[in-house]
Structure formats: structure tokens, C-alpha cells
Amino acid sequence: MERMAGDQSAGGVRRVCVVGASGKLGRYMVRHALDRGYEVVGVCRPESVVKLAEFDGRMTVVPGRTDDPDVVGRAVAGCDGVLTVLVPRGVRGYSTGTAQAVLDAAEPGARLVFSCGWHITRDGRDVYTRRLRAFVAVFGLLARLARFADLRDQVEACRRIFASDTRWTVVRGSDLEEGESEGLPVWSRHVGDPVLASNRTRRVDFALFMVEALTDETLVREAPAIVGRRTPSALAHAR
Ligand SMILES: NC(=O)c1ccc[n+]([C@@H]2O[C@H](COP(=O)([O-])OP(=O)(O)OC[C@H]3O[C@@H](n4cnc5c(N)ncnc54)[C@H](OP(=O)(O)O)[C@@H]3O)[C@@H](O)[C@H]2O)c1
């Protein structure tokens, strides 16, 4: 069943932390959060602080690894919302460490929104195409052998999030592309829903969905799989 996000309550969000702020998704999220008038704190690796130069004076940057509990603890203090980019980089549990640090340090009752891909399943009821299954198997193996990334790390990170009693949302992104915003993506609880078939979302809109989720109570403890709202499958199947 497809949903249109944006069914919001007041939310009460004032201060937001973006964990992984310097990447492409992170910087879009910082922009959307500033546009909403939120106070923004960002965590990124020290060598990447320069990538946030365009926001100088408009946000606070806490340099450090996103899986460092001390760094994350300082950054999320006093935040009503935390937006976390989960990246399974390397083979030492970077995603899992990042998710755990956020789960442990976030303020009680804070809205926690995490990013990942369609390959994550919450209840095993997602239906994947043969192409996607092959990609995950082949890319997953090659990336692990090259010690570039470990998709199993993102799986473990999400398992911990799903098991937590925090106010989480795990946003599962389709294939991403750059380009002008098409508006808030459409979502479904399960991959395999025809509304998602186009498998394409603008990165700027992935970020928009993450930021909107902060104030959307209907997304608490949901793992929405998203697709661009102007894609053919969304236009054909979204209500
Ligand atoms: N790319 C896709 O097509 C796609 C599809 C579906 C879902 N997603 C999800 O979307 C989110 C963002 O993905 P993205 O591909 O668009 O990437 P991105 O936003 O550019 O983010 C990449 C992140 O990885 C960090 N990073 C890079 N090299 C690293 C290293 N060696 N060690 C630790 N961290 C490192 C970057 O930090 P620095 O700035 O410090 O380098 C940055 O925070 C992820 O959660 C991903 O699972 C992506």
C-alpha cells in the first residue's frame, strides 16, 4: 500500500543533528533543515569539514568519526531530531557503530531518522527483482573482498534500530540521481509494491523525505521504501 508522506503533527523540532553531514545526502539535509529554521549541528570526518564551508556561520560542526560515541554524544546533546546517514564503509562495522552511538546518546524521545537502501528488510516481506538480488550479491561480495564496504554492516545497524524502543524511522532509498527537486517522494512499506517499480529518486528529495520525517508521526517505527513522486510508477499507482 503506497503512502504520501506529509501527514504531520506539530512535531516540536527545534534543534537537529545531521550525522554524516558532509556527504551528498548530508549536505542536502543540512540545507532543508536550515530552510525550516532549525538549529543545525553536523558531524563529519575532520578531513571533510571543508565540504561544509558553504554553511559557515549557519551551523555548528563537530568534527570526528560518526561511530565515535564521544563525538556523537556531544553533537546530539539537546537535539530533538537526529538525521543519520548510514554508510557501510570499510569492514569494521562503521554503520553499526554509528547507529549504536546515536541510539545510545540521543535525547529521550528524540526523533531518529536513518538512511539506507532498499536491500534492508524489516519483516522479510519485501519482494526483490532478480536484478537487485544479483547486484547486492555481486557488489556485496566484491566490496567486501576489496575491504571497501560491507553491506552486512548496514543490515546489522538496521537490526539494532528496529529492535530499539526509540522513536526511529529507517528511510530506504531507491537508486539515486541528481537533479532539481520533484517534491516529496512516495513511499511503501514493502519493496515489490508497483508504486516503487521505477526505482529512482532525486537525492535532494531523499533528503527532503528524511527531514520531513522528523515531524511526521505516521512514520515513527516505520521503514518506508521511497520513490520519486514524478516517476512513471508513482504517477501510475500513487493515490
Ligand atoms: N548511492 C545510491 O545510489 C544509494 C541508493 C540507495 C540508498 N542510498 C543510501 O543513501 C545514503 C547516502 O548515500 P550516497 O551514496 O548518496 O552517499 P553520500 O551522501 O555521498 O554519503 C557518503 C558518506 O560516506 C562517508 N564516507 C566516505 N568515505 C568514507 C570512509 N572511508 N570512511 C567513512 N565514511 C566515509 C562520507 O563522509 P565524508 O564526507 O567524510 O567523505 C559521507 O558521509 C546511504 O545511507 C546509502 O545507503 C544510496
Image: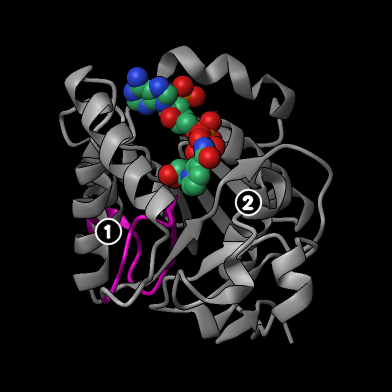
* Residue 122 visible, this angle: yes
Q: Residue at the spot x=27%, y=47% of the render?
A: 154
Q: In which quarter of the image is residue 170?
A: bottom left
The residue where tag 1 is placed is 158
Q: Does the magenta stretch include residue 132?
A: no
Disc 2 marks which amino acid?
Ala
Q: Earlier in the sequence, mark 2 or mark 1?
A: 1
Left/right of residue 220 with respect to residue 59 in the rendered view: left
* Residue 44 visible, this angle: no
Task: Read off the magenta span.
Answer: 104-123
Disc 1 marks which amino acid?
Cys
From mark 2 to mark 1, how far is it between C-alphas?
A: 18 Å
**Which element carries disc 1, helix, strand or loop?**
helix
The residue where tag 2 is placed is 207
Q: Does the magenta stretch include residue 120?
A: yes
Q: Residue at the spot x=82%, y=56% of the render?
A: 182
Rendered position, 46 above or below 228: above
Residue 115's spot in the image, x, y percent?
A: 45, 52
